[in-house]
């Protein structure tokens, strides 16, 4: 074997890499800890993720790729190179890469992302929209002529599209997702209890007791943080239905966008979607009751695939195998010569 072809889901909170024939081989947080003076990367992945909110003096933690947009070019390149080297090890052959990109990204944002990947060690890069990758990774055949509604709810944004015959008929991106849920929980605890908590604590609350619809049998959890008035440690008991209430405004933005997209979709595609079920993917698809909320809002059956956070990366792997099908829709590999590298 002369080399690997990689499918990469460049998410806001995590980077997932698949290898053709092997499936998912890496799932790491997309965080970088760097020296603020020299701007050199110190740690990447899990170590940097757990350091957020606990940084020593002179060290900062960031997400260099947020919502599919490169916010720090140098650190994004180092982060991707670090993970690609973990997968490729000492392989001397540069890989072809299919990477996911938000459906509403601009040409400049796409060229920058390609530039980052090629600088990190890719031979050539093809960018495919996240909802399309999510559909392929969920088992939808690129040649399937019927309409499929996909909602990919990640950490930085929620991408949704109606997919038909290997292309997107309609698409919509909402800048509301898992990170916004965490920020809403932080604000709720500060406003109601005067409790200051970090983003990692808010994420744990979301994962353990967060819900999109009220639970019949409510659950509770202890939230630990700092008293806003006294500055001393404080612990409060919060319930899952409280978290549901504070997430409602964010969730309404997602469901409203999905309803609006239906209004632009052709009647025949809507008939196809009604006969099947809506696909809900992405890391935030695991929020308790989110599938139920979307089902009630859109009057559709909702399916959440096994390991929904891996669907986009698996879809990139499928796209690598079947790029001859996607080629007719303008998807192709870009090389260093075709993209102006910074």
Image (cartoon, rainbow, N blue to C red):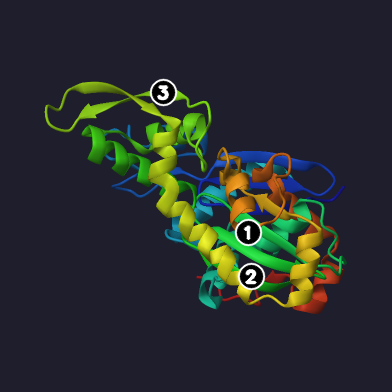
Query: Which sits in the foreground, 239 or 98?
Result: 239
Give how far across and how far down residue 243 sits, in percent: 41, 37
Circles 2 and 1: CB atoms closer than 8 Å:
yes
Q: Callout 3 environment at 10 Å: few (<14), some (14 to 19), or many (20+)?
A: some
From what the image shows, is residue 22 above or below residue 115?
A: above
Give how far across and how far down residue 227 sits, in percent: 19, 28
Count of residue discs: 3
Query: Which sits in the foreground, 176 or 294?
Result: 294
Please tell me whether mark 1 sits on a helix, a strand or a loop: helix
Question: Measuring 71% from the left and 49% from the top, which residue is drawn there?
Answer: 311
Residue receiving disc 2: 262
Say which label, 1 or 3, has the lower sequence index. 3
Alpha-carbon span between mark 3 and mark 2: 38 Å
Please tell me whether mark 2 sits on a helix, a strand or a loop: helix
Residue receiving disc 3: 221
Please tell me whether mark 3 sits on a helix, a strand or a loop: strand
């Amino acid at each position: 074997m002369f080399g690997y072809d990689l499918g990469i889901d460049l998410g806001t909170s995590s980077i997932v890499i698949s290898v053709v024939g092997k499936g998912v081989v890496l799932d790491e947080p997309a965080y970088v800890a760097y020296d603020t003076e020299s701007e050199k990367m110190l740690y990447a992945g899990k170590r940097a993720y757990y350091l957020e909110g606990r940084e020593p003096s002179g060290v900062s933690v960031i997400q260099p790729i947020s919502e599919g947009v490169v916010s720090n070019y140098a650190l994004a390149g180092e982060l991707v190179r670090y993970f690609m080297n973990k997968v490729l090890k000492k392989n001397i052959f540069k890989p072809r890469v299919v990477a996911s990109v938000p459906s509403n990204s601009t040409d400049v944002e796409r060229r920058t992302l390609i530039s980052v990947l090629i600088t990190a060690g890719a031979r050539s890069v093809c960018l495919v929209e996240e909802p399309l990758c999510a559909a392929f990774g969920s088992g939808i055949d690129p040649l399937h002529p019927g309409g499929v509604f996909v909602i990919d709810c990640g950490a930085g944004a929620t991408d949704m599209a109606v997919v038909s015959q290997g292309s997107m008929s309609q698409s919509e991106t909402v800048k509301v997702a898992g990170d916004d849920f965490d920020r809403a929980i932080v604000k709720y605890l500060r406003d109601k209890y005067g409790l200051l908590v970090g983003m990692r604590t808010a994420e744990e609350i979301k994962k353990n007791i967060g819900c999109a619809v009220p639970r019949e049998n409510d659950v509770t959890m202890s939230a630990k943080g700092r008293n806003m008035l006294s500055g001393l440690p404080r612990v409060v008991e919060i319930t899952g239905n409280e978290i549901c209430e504070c997430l409602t405004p964010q969730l309404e933005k997602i469901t409203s966008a999905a309803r609006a997209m239906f209004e632009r979709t052709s009647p025949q595609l809507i008939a196809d979607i009604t006969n099947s079920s809506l696909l809900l993917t992405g890391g935030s698809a695991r929020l308790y009751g989110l599938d139920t909320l979307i089902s009630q809002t859109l009057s559709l059956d909702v399916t959440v695939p096994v390991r929904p956070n891996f669907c986009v990366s698996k879809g990139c792997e499928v796209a690598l195998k079947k790029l001859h099908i996607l080629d007719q829709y303008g998807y192709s590999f870009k090389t260093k010569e075709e993209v102006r590298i910074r």
